[in-house]
Image (cartoon, rainbow, N blue to C red):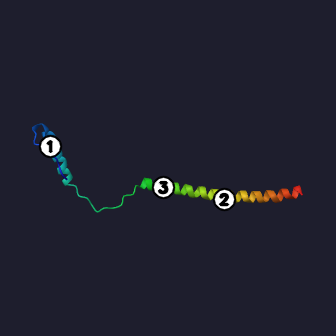
Amino acid sequence: MFVQISPNENDLSETICSLNFASRVRGIELGPARKHLDTVELLRHKQIVWLMECCCIHKVLAFHCLTVIVFLFKHVYSSFLG
């Protein structure tokens, strides 16, 4: 990290603040890099996928039910209509 300091006396408080911050940053140790997953976001995506799958299943079932109803309607009313 690079810290810019000023030799001007008027900037002394800012220079001290910058040096203190740099000192704190120097003490930080990073561990090995790892992939970070937001569990809330992941859960939200899983819920969306689940809802989409349910909608697809519902549409397929609705289509099959409608097909059966049309089939029954044709055969029941065809006997009445002659």
- The percent coordinates of residue 13 (x first, y second) are 14, 39
Is residue 14 shown above or below 22?
above
> How far apart in space, not on screen, are marks 3 and 1 (Cα)?
47 Å
Query: The residue under label 3 is which amino acid type?
Result: His
Is residue 38 rendered to the left or right of residue 78?
A: left
Is residue 62 rendered to the left or right of residue 78?
A: left
The structure residue drawn at horizontal position 52% and vertical position 54%, both measured from the top left corner, is 48
Labels 3 and 2: the sequence-earlier one: 3
- Judging from the image, what secondary structure is the residue with disc 3 in? helix
> How far apart in space, not on screen, are marks 1 and 2 (Cα)?
71 Å
CA neighbours of label 2 inside 10 A, class few (<14), some (14 to 19), many (20+):
few
- The percent coordinates of residue 43 (x first, y second) are 46, 55
On the image, which quarter does residue 42 sit in? bottom left
Labels 3 and 1: the sequence-earlier one: 1
- The percent coordinates of residue 30 (x first, y second) are 25, 59
Is residue 16 rendered to the left or right of residue 55?
A: left
Name the disc covering residue 45, or none: 3
The structure residue drawn at horizontal position 36% and vertical position 58%, both measured from the top left corner, is 36
Q: Quadrant of the C terminus?
A: bottom right
> How far apart in space, not on screen, are marks 3 and 2 (Cα)?
24 Å
Pointer 1 residue = 15
- Judging from the image, what secondary structure is the residue with disc 1 in? helix
Query: The residue under label 1 is which amino acid type?
Result: Thr
Pointer 2 residue = 61
On the image, which quarter does residue 16 sit in? top left
Query: The residue under label 2 is which amino acid type?
Result: Leu
Q: Nearer the viewer, mark 3 or mark 1?
A: 1
Is residue 5 rendered to the left or right of residue 69?
A: left
Labels 1 and 2: the sequence-earlier one: 1
